[in-house]
Amino acid sequence: MVQSPALRVAVVDDHPLFVRGLELLLPAATGARAQVVGSTGDAAAAASLMSRCLPDLALVDLHMPPPGGIRAVAAIRRTTPRVRVVAMSGDDDPAPAMEALRAGAEAFLPKSAEPEALLPPLMAVLDGWAVLPAQLLRGLLRSGPGIRVDLDPEERALLRSIAAGRGTLEIADQLHVSERTVKRMTAALLRKMRVSCRAEAAALAGRLGLLSD
């Protein structure tokens, strides 16, 4: 009996050689723990691809022809919110990466990463971590909005857990609530902080000194 891969990956990228490389090298480099289950070179088809192949995680190239990678990220988050989105880029400009995070991406990885180096961060994203290069994280810390956020003790505890990279199940166990409650609490916290994803919340919390007891 053939086992399903531990991590089902969909790729939204208009570079066929890059996609084919991932299809071949990702299973080989990870001992078949990760596999590309679908791909498209059309950003407009990203959402339909997710519905069709039901991946755990989507890799989205930010530099694609219109409508572009940022809109692909937003469309995936809107139509299949359970799919974790990892933005990727081949250059060092942090601006598109920050836009992708605001559109709902949970992580950003450079396209220069070797296939065998992709599994740990991809599994971390699947478990609820926000994975960002140090340079991008510093940019988020510097660019957070100048707002005051007053949090109650429960919200601070949730924010510290998010900033520590804990997944939904782990946070639920820690707070003695259900996973559904954690998701509801997290959504309310993001709205209160005026951010769109966990990565931005953690960065803003560090900038405003919200992580201390």
Image (cartoon, rainbow, N blue to C red):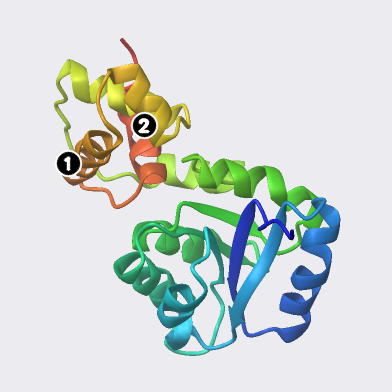
Disc 1 residue type (three-letter)? Ala
Marks counted in the figure total: 2
Q: Quadrant of residue 16?
A: bottom right
Task: Please give the residue where the numbered disc 2 appears in the rendered image.
Answer: 207
Is any atom of residue 131 visible in this view? no
Task: Please give the residue where the numbered disc 1 appears in the rendered image.
Answer: 188
Label 2 to label 1: alpha-carbon separation: 20 Å
Residue closest to the eye, 142 or 124 = 124
Q: Quadrant of residue 41?
A: bottom right
The x, y position of residue 163, in whole percent, is 42, 30
Mark 1 neighbour density, 10 Å: few (under 14) some (14–19) many (20 or more): few
Residue beneath the point at 79% across and 60% down: 27
Residue 152 placement, left or right of 132? left
Residue beneath the point at 46% across and 52% down: 106
- Ranked by sequence position, the earlier of labels 2 and 1 is 1
Mark 2 neighbour density, 10 Å: few (under 14) some (14–19) many (20 or more): some
Residue 23 placement, left or right of 37? right
Callout in the foreground (2, 1) = 1
The x, y position of residue 101, in whole percent, is 42, 57
Residue beneath the point at 29% across and 52% down: 196
The x, y position of residue 193, in whole percent, is 21, 40
Residue closest to the eye, 14 or 132 = 14
Disc 2 residue type (three-letter)? Arg
